[in-house]
């Protein structure tokens, strides 16, 4: 029986890059960007599987990895687009497939009982990077301010490195997934260039506002959790002293 690993999907992504290069000339920079994404993401996922002691690459992870291979192709196309025009229809089709598969991996995880924290993290990071790639592509149409959508997840991670209390586990909230999906769709609409420029700006602005609300709510929750954690030891000490006095 074949033991599937992240590197199988990295190879599949490399084949996809080769196929796309037959349709449009991917520059050396584009090919390098796509290959670098495949290598780094596969290495990180392999390390995560080893750290958790996983013995196989589950079906839900396989779906996410397929989506990740599409993200590699989109990355290559965006990097190449700075030197030459890329087929808009092809780019939008690839991104649309990646977004559609985002609804599939969760369904597969639930149906097969293969949901894991690592799989959820893998899914989230693929979402985040696709968002960043779309923002880089869309910046030429609506302005560089749209990069705020793409870097927000990474800014949150950096803040966690600097402020340990921001690394606390957040409660599950389906609204995060909804916002991510809406942002992906909005950025794809901008990339398609079918609407007037003013409409594209409004669509991207709505996406940014939703993301700010979602991240803002999480930050508020973390601040309240930190304050609650700071009060609990004091209350415990006071309660213990009162009990001893009695």
Image (cartoon, rainbow, N blue to C red):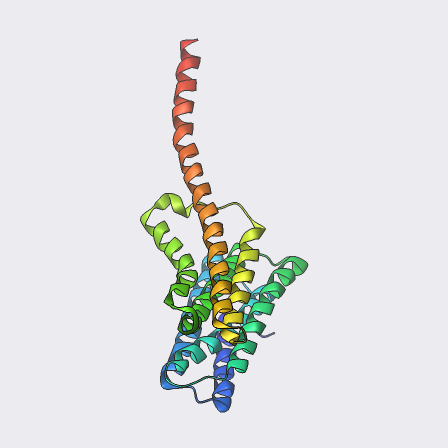
Asked whether, in this view, residue 65 is left or right of residue 149, the answer is right
- For the N terminus, the image quarter is bottom right
Q: In which image quadrant can residue 76 be found? A: bottom left
Query: Is any atom of residue 116 visible in this view?
Result: no
- Which is more toward the observer, 69 or 219? 219
Relative height, residue 220 to residue 4 (above, below) = above
Q: Quadrant of the C terminus?
A: top left
Q: Compared to 244, does 179 lie above or below?
A: below
User: Residue at 65% of width from left, 57% of height from top?
Assistant: 110
Which of these two is toward me, 43 or 94?
94
In the displayed structure image, the side of residue 231 where residue 58 appears, left or right: right
In this rendered view, identify the residue nearer to me: 221 or 203.
203
Identify which residue, 71 or 84, lies in the foreground: 84
Q: Residue furthest top?
A: 246
Q: Is residue 234 left or right of residue 99?
A: left
Q: Position of residue 72 (x, y in %)?
A: 47, 75
> Percent position (x, y) of residue 114?
61, 59
Q: Is residue 111 left or right of residue 20?
A: right
Work out which residue is located at the far left of the displayed protein and give it.
162
> Hey, which quadrant is residue 138 in on the image?
bottom left
Q: Residue at x 50, y 85 (%)?
A: 20
Residue 18 on image: x %, y %? 48, 86
Does residue 94 appear in this view? yes
Q: Is residue 124 above or below residue 32?
A: above
Q: Residue at x 31, y 49 (%)?
A: 162
Provide residue 174's location: percent of width, then percent of height: 58, 51
């Amino acid at each position: 029986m074949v033991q599937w690993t992240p590197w199988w999907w990295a190879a599949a992504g490399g084949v996809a890059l080769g196929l796309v290069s037959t349709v449009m000339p991917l520059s050396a920079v584009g090919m390098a960007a796509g290959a670098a994404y495949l290598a780094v993401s596969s290495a990180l996922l392999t390390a995560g599987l080893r750290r958790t002691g996983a013995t196989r690459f589950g079906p839900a992870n396989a779906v996410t990895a397929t989506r990740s291979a599409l993200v590699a192709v989109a990355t290559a196309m965006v990097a190449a687009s700075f030197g030459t025009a890329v087929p808009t229809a092809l780019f939008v089709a690839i991104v649309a497939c990646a977004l559609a598969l985002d609804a599939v991996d969760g369904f597969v995880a639930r149906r097969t009982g293969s949901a894991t924290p690592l799989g959820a993290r893998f899914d989230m990071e693929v979402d985040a990077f696709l968002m960043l790639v779309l923002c880089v592509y869309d910046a030429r149409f609506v302005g560089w301010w749209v990069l705020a959508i793409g870097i927000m997840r990474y800014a949150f991670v950096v803040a966690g490195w600097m402020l340990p209390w921001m690394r606390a586990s957040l409660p599950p909230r389906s609204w995060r997934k909804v916002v991510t999906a809406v942002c992906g769709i909005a950025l794809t609409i901008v990339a398609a260039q079918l609407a007037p420029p003013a409409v594209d700006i409004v669509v991207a602005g709505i996406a940014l506002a939703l993301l700010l609300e979602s991240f803002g709510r999480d930050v508020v929750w973390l601040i309240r959790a930190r304050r609650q954690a700071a009060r609990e030891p004091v209350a415990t000490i006071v309660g213990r002293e009162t009990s001893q006095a009695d």
